[in-house]
Amino acid sequence: MFKRIVSVALVAAVLVVGVFAEGQQEAAGSVKLTFSSVSVPDDAHTKAMTVFKDEVEKLSGGQITVDVYHSGQLFNQTAEQDAIRQGTVDMVYTSAQWNAQFIPKLSMFGAAFTFQSYDQMTKTFNGSIGKKLFDEIAASQGIRPLTAYYLGTRQLNLIEKVGAVTKPEQMKGVKLRVPNSPTWIAMGKALGGDPTPMAFGEVYMGLKTGAVDGQDNPLPTDKNAKFYEVTKYIVLTNHVVDSTWPTINEKKWQSLSKQQQEWVLAAAAKGREFCDKTVLENEASLIAFFKEQGLTVIENPDRAAFSAYAKNSYLTESKDLSKDWDLALYDEVQKIK
């Protein structure tokens, strides 16, 4: 009788261990991604984070879950770039400008007037050129851009004391807020301004107090961050057709199965479809909005003069940056329409 009890107990123990192991295996197959951004709630690429989350959770049947943090809840703009490289966060938005600190030739994609249209930008980054660049970033930096979302076309946005600007010479001495990276600082110079590094979360108050005289962002960002409340002019320079790249830590990426990677890529593509469509639609309607808010919109500045000034600036005062450009690749991009 005793032997029988022991035997039954052993069988039960084996079953329990088996069930526990199976549960552990199932848990090991599940993935949680933490996605962080400094962008504000109404930005299209902020909303695209939730589109990505919903899509990847649906495609994976809940095997992959995503925690979304926006508005700098976890990190400021500079810290989140360090965090993804260190693996303390799984996903953030990066860009050509941020990655150029590590791969200098990428600075040409954040330079003023490299792209002339949305189509040219998206065909570049979401085509064969982009795939090679993203693989290079993954190999050298330990982070992998998944695709490129349209952030919008950057325009100048200035406070009242600056006055109406139509030529780059009128930007002399204007404290133009830029993110704190060499590529952004060079762009500020290329627009004729005095580049003044400042965290995104400080820009509204900086404009209000006069700590900076202006900033540049796509029109949807100007609206969502309410910069129109503390500025007077929008100058449609169209100087950067900008993109932002949902990017994952490479170790995290390599820990995913091939199927999980496919789900993540498909969800990123869904986010891009939403983001690009939203930004394009918003840009088409926002000029009227800003005029209604009392801003002066300068619709036809001398873009040729701005472009010529920018080219000279990159070749002279920012030559330490432009010397690393891949001019053959630059010419290849110019052929894309």
Image: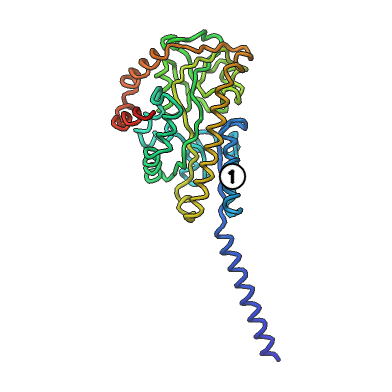
The answer, for residue 24, to whether it is visible in the render is: yes
> Dividing the picture into quarters, in which one does residue 96 lie?
top left
Q: Is residue 12 above or below residue 139?
A: below
| Crowd rating for badge 1 (residues with CA inside 10 Å; few <14, some 14–19, many 20+) | many
Depth check: give the residue in front, 49 or 32: 49
Q: Residue type at mark 1?
A: Lys
Q: Position of residue 98 (x, y in %)?
A: 44, 33
The residue where tag 1 is placed is 53
In this orientation, does residue 202 appear?
Answer: no
Q: For residue 303, what is the image quadrant?
A: top left
Up/down of 59 relative to 302, above or below: below
Find residue 127 and report its image quarter: top left
The residue drawn where x is 64% and y is 73% is 16
Between 164 and 57, the one nearer to me in the picture: 57
Q: Residue at x 48, y 10 (%)?
A: 165
Q: Position of residue 145 (x, y in %)?
A: 45, 41
Farthest residue to the front: give it. Answer: 337
Give the residue at the far right of this rendering.
1
Quarter of the rendering occupied by the N terminus:
bottom right
Q: Position of residue 289 (x, y in %)?
A: 61, 18
Q: Where residue 335 sits in the image (x, y, percent)?
A: 34, 28
